[in-house]
Image (tube, helix red, strand yellow):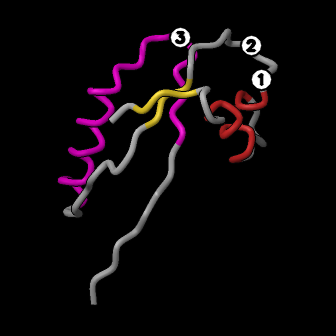
């Protein structure tokens, strides 16, 4: 029987050097290598902010809620 899995990830670009198109391409290639179908359903981007080593999202015990703080209504942009 077939299944579909949904995975949520957060990518952090602390140095403003992430190229999202390259990331999307790499994820698609990973799907090919694993012999699985892969589709990016949505992509959101937070507004820019100053990085600080003390941010919650820079800690090993960061929670989903900590990441979601950057995606509150009117504080992010749709990437797709």
CB within 8 Å, label 2 to label 1: yes
Query: Within the image, what quadrant is residue 55 found in?
Result: top right
From the viewer's perspective, is 29 left or right of 44?
left
The main secondary structure of the magenta stretch is helix
Residue 71: x and y in percent read 61, 34
Residue 15 in magenta?
Answer: yes
Q: In what quadrant of the picture does the N terminus appear?
A: bottom left
CB within 8 Å, label 1 to label 3: no
Question: Alpha carbon of mark 2 to alpha carbon of mark 1: how far?
Answer: 6 Å
From the viewer's perspective, is 63 left or right of 76?
right
- Which portion, as a residue range, is magenta? 10-34
Judging by the rendered image, the residue that carries numbered circle 3 is 15
Q: In what quadrant of the picture does the C terminus appear?
A: top left
Q: Label 3: how many residues lie within 10 Å, few (<14), some (14-19) or many (20+)?
A: few
Question: Alpha carbon of mark 1 to alpha carbon of mark 3: how far?
Answer: 14 Å
At 41% across and 19% down in the image, what residue appears?
18
From the viewer's perspective, is 66 left or right of 37?
right
Question: Alpha carbon of mark 3 to alpha carbon of mark 2: how far?
Answer: 11 Å
Q: Which mark is residue 55?
A: 1
Query: Within the image, what quadrant is residue 25 found in?
Result: top left
Helix or strand or loop: what does disc 2 sit on?
loop
Judging by the rendered image, the residue that carries numbered circle 2 is 52
Tag 2 or tag 3, which sits nearer the N-term?
A: 3
């Amino acid at each position: 029987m077939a299944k579909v899995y949904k995975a949520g990830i957060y990518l952090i670009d602390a140095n403003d050097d992430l190229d999202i198109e390259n990331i999307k391409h790499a994820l698609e290639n990973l799907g090919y290598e694993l012999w699985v179908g892969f589709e990016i359903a949505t992509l959101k981007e937070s507004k820019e902010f100053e990085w600080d080593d003390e941010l919650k999202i820079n800690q090993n015990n960061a929670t989903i809620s900590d990441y979601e703080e950057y995606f509150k209504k009117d504080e992010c942009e749709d990437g797709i």
